[in-house]
Image: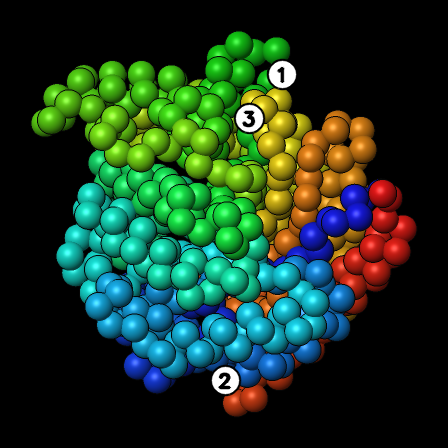
Amino acid sequence: MFPREFAWGAGTAAYQIEGGWQADGKGPSIWDTFCHEKARVFGEQNGDEACNSYELWEKDLECIQQLGLTHYRLSLSWARLLPDGTTRHVNQKGVQYYRKVLDDLLACSVSPMVTLYHFDLPQALQDQGGWKSAGMATLFDSYAKFCFQTFGDRVKLWITINEPYVCAKLGHEDGIHAPGLKEPGVAAYLVGHNMLRAHAMAWHSYNSFYRTKQKGAVSLAINSDWLEPSSADGAADIAAAERQLAFTLGWFAWPVFVTGDYPEVMRSSVDAQSEKLGCDGGSRLPSFSEDEPAVLGTADFFALNYYTSRKVTPGGGRGEVLCMTSDRGSRDVLDPSWPICGVSWLAVVPHGLRKLLKYIKDTFNNPAVYITENGFSQVGQLQIEDVQRSEFYRDTILEVAKAIQEDGVDVRGYFAWSLLDNFEWADGFSVRFGLFHVDFTDARRSRTIYQSGREYAKMISKYKCGQSE
Ligand code: GAL
């Protein structure tokens, strides 16, 4: 059912699991700062200790082995490696930590997929303007080169930036993620643009200086819901769904996979709305410069984070208000037949993943795809026997199989989110995405497998054995 080399993985991110926020010379990141401010995060919780993976990495490795994973996706904490964000000062303790993690994985025949940036910018760089500043792209490129140089002999799969959409929109428009800026309609486009430039520079650096020797592949992880028209025969709904897809998936995938520039509908909408509102300096959606490394063609595979699906209808433009929703002129609605589980935004729609995969195949010229995140959380009363989540993984993996077999999508791997219950950003520890339960009241942070973890392990062993040539 699945190709021989199919990657069976699970993922985590540094800030969500490591803890040790000040250990051994680590610098602060924007998430440290954000969580230490009042009323930012659920219950004013923070990732100071989280799962304490900085000290308990071997426990995580046991979990990885218990599941039988072939791959493990982790992120590097930029500020643990480079405390002020620059290569002027390298924290050797941080280097040693990640070298050990990578060596241990390889010794257990688990291939690492390494994300360079998963939301946790060094605070020192935020103090210089953060992702809104154009200079961040070259600083990211230096950090990326440092990582390729230091760890590249051990890593074949790299993700430069995780979910630029979420960093841009939630961090700089809605203000619910670090750095907590609320600058609607302006900052998100700037941040997204600088992230694309940063990604492209890092890809070109890998391509020019490391690829021949290290033989790895580099991409960026793009999150997208599956979005479909509220009514299948209404032209306005169909156009609204297309616009919405252009403003989420297309925002980052179009420049990288199709034209080197933003989707036409995004360009025309933001330009027109900017003019109407009389914005200083022309369009709020920046343009790519020909003097910089091209963005087009800077992904060796398509990395997709998929969680949920929505129906879309026109609207959402709050009069003349500056915000991304009014630029795109569409809003999404929940389909009442799609059950909501765990958190309020998460309608559980496994077949949406199959549709999105087919869309990606057709729109982006049949790329190799890794599903770099997919999962379903629980909140409230804890269930170790989490029947619904077990079913979710079974159903979802069957949809992936159909995408491969019936739709011919070139899916190369699936990474469940997440290996462990962890610090779920603005929701703190109230939302649990783990295949393993973590007891945050226990100093040892004991890890216990959920039924969904056992189910995933069973599927991995079944599909690995029956893998086709
Ligand atoms: C993603 C993010 C992950 C995880 C997940 C679940 O946006 O990359 O870190 O938190 O959502 O909400």
The image position of residue 379, as x and y in percent, is 59, 63
User: Identity of the amino acid at label 3?
Assistant: Phe
User: Identity of the amino acid at label 2?
Assistant: Glu
Q: Residue furthest front?
A: 213
Q: Which residue is depicted at the point 40% across and 56% down?
A: 117
Q: Does residue 460 appear anywhere in the picture? A: yes
The image position of residue 437, as x and y in percent, is 64, 73
Query: Quadrant location of the N terminus?
Result: top right
The label number, if any, that marks residue 55 in the structure image: 2
Describe the colour scheme in one phrase.
rainbow
Asked which secondary structure carries label 3, the reply is loop
Q: Which residue is mark 1?
A: 232
Q: Which residue is depicted at the point 66% across and 28% down?
A: 358
Quarter of the figure with residue 95:
bottom left
> Is residue 318 left or right of 387 when viewed as pictured?
left
Q: CA distance from mark 3 to mark 1?
A: 23 Å
From the viewer's side, name the closer residue of 253 and 292: 292
Above or below: residue 195 compared with residue 445? above
Label 1 near label 3: C-beta < 8 Å? no
Q: Nearer the viewer, mark 2 or mark 1?
A: 2
Q: Which residue is mark 3?
A: 364
Q: Earlier in the sequence, mark 2 or mark 3?
A: 2
Above or below: residue 363 compared with residue 90? above
Q: Which residue is depicted at the point 26% across and 65% down?
A: 87
Q: Residue furthest bottom?
A: 443
Question: Disc 1, ligand 1: is the CB inside 8 Å?
Answer: no
